[in-house]
């Protein structure tokens, strides 16, 4: 009897030890942090085994992305390249450059980080919004072309010193990936990161279910007040990004000008694709492809997705009668279950 009591006491002490020093992750609270970065808002939801607040650690990593890829940060790597100041390329810039080059080559220039002169010309960057002439477009196009960049010994060479880069169509996605990786390295297995609508997640949400991510209806609303949803995704260990022309646009002389510029023609896209949502292994990849699909249009976008096992897409376009129509890749349905 005495031995039995001692044995029970031993197991009780072992159990208490593990509860104290190896807490059950299921009992740890989910933390939430919010803030502003890259000119937009971010939010984090994560579960740390010890209930630690990792907001400062993640923000430090996001500031590192800003220091590499923000065109509005005069000391950033990309800003120095634009100003022709010699600079050794950091690892984040190289990662973005390699992914951007891959998407550019695959799409034959529909995605191009040298698009900055055109973005500014049409008033979606540093430039003011004005009537744009064909000759101005032609002049700006002379400074656009991903194949006019050369990577040599950790330096980027431009064929024309007037060329300028804008990685905003991929850098936000990288920021999401960097933030999620930071949480992972600090011991989190359940987390979701969102920056300006781009999302990556791992594990499960506080309800023990895959993370639920909404896809907005592409309602023309530059105020971003209308949050009506077209569908809801159920995601775990994956990323998603949406690009569309229903938030950033303006009208001039009765014509709508969307912020998505086709680097091949120099003009804002004018087809009927309203939004492109891409699910991919990384948010950087999803971000870049979503932008590329908005340039290419629904048919080319769907074709690329069906030939790339790493991509799934959900496309919303305007039908002939003005109603919303949808297309999706053959593998997309698994993300809505």
Image (cartoon, rainbow, N blue to C red):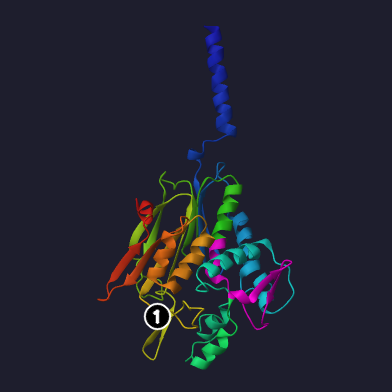
Q: Residue at x 50, y 73 (%)?
A: 110
Q: Residue furthest left?
A: 321
Is residue 274 or residue 302 the one in the foreground? 302
Q: Position of residue 4 (x, y in %)?
A: 52, 10
Q: Position of residue 300 (x, y in %)?
A: 41, 69
Observer able to see residue 195: no
Asked whether 204 falls inside the magenta stretch, the response is: no
Is residue 148 or residue 161 the one in the foreground? 148
Residue 58 lies left or right of residue 199; in this view the side is right
Question: Compared to 99, does 263 lie above or below?
Answer: below
- Quarter where residue 62 is shown: bottom right
- Quarter where residue 242 is shown: bottom left
Total numbered labels: 1
Q: Which stretch appears magenta?
A: 146-174
Q: Residue furthest top?
A: 1
Residue hosting label 1 = 270
* Element on which disc 1 rests: loop
């Amino acid at each position: 009897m005495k031995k039995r009591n001692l044995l029970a006491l031993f197991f009780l002490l072992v159990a208490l030890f593990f509860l104290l020093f190896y807490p059950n992750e299921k009992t740890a609270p989910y933390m939430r942090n919010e803030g502003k970065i890259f000119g937009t808002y971010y939010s984090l939801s994560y579960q740390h085994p010890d209930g630690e607040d990792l907001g400062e650690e993640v923000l430090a990593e996001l500031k590192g992305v800003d220091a590499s890829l923000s065109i509005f940060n005069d000391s950033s790597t990309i800003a120095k390249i634009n100003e022709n100041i010699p600079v050794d390329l950091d690892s984040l810039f190289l990662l973005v450059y390699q992914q951007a080059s891959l998407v550019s080559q695959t799409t034959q220039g529909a995605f191009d980080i040298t698009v900055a002169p055109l973005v500014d010309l049409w008033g979606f960057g540093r430039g003011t919004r004005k009537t744009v002439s064909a000759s101005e477009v032609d002049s700006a196009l002379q400074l656009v072309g991903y194949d006019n960049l050369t990577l040599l010994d950790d330096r980027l060479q431009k064929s024309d010193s007037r060329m300028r880069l804008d990685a905003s169509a991929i850098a936000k996605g990288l920021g999401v990936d960097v933030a999620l990786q930071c949480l992972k390295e600090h011991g989190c297995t359940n987390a979701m990161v969102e920056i300006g609508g781009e999302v990556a997640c791992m594990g499960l949400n506080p309800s023990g279910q895959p993370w639920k991510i909404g896809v907005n209806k592409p309602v023309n609303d530059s105020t971003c007040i209308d949050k009506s949803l077209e569908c809801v995704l159920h995601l775990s260990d994956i990323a998603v990004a949406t690009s569309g022309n229903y938030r950033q646009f303006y009208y001039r002389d009765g014509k709508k000008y969307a912020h998505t510029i086709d680097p091949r023609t120099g003009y804002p896209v004018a087809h009927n694709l309203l939004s492109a949502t891409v699910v991919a292994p990384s948010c950087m990849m999803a971000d870049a492809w979503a932008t590329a699909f908005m340039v290419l249009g629904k048919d080319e976008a769907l074709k690329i997705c069906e030939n790339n096992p790493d991509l799934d897409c959900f496309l919303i376009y305007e039908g002939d009668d003005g109603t919303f129509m949808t297309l999706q890749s053959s593998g997309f349905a698994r993300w809505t279950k």
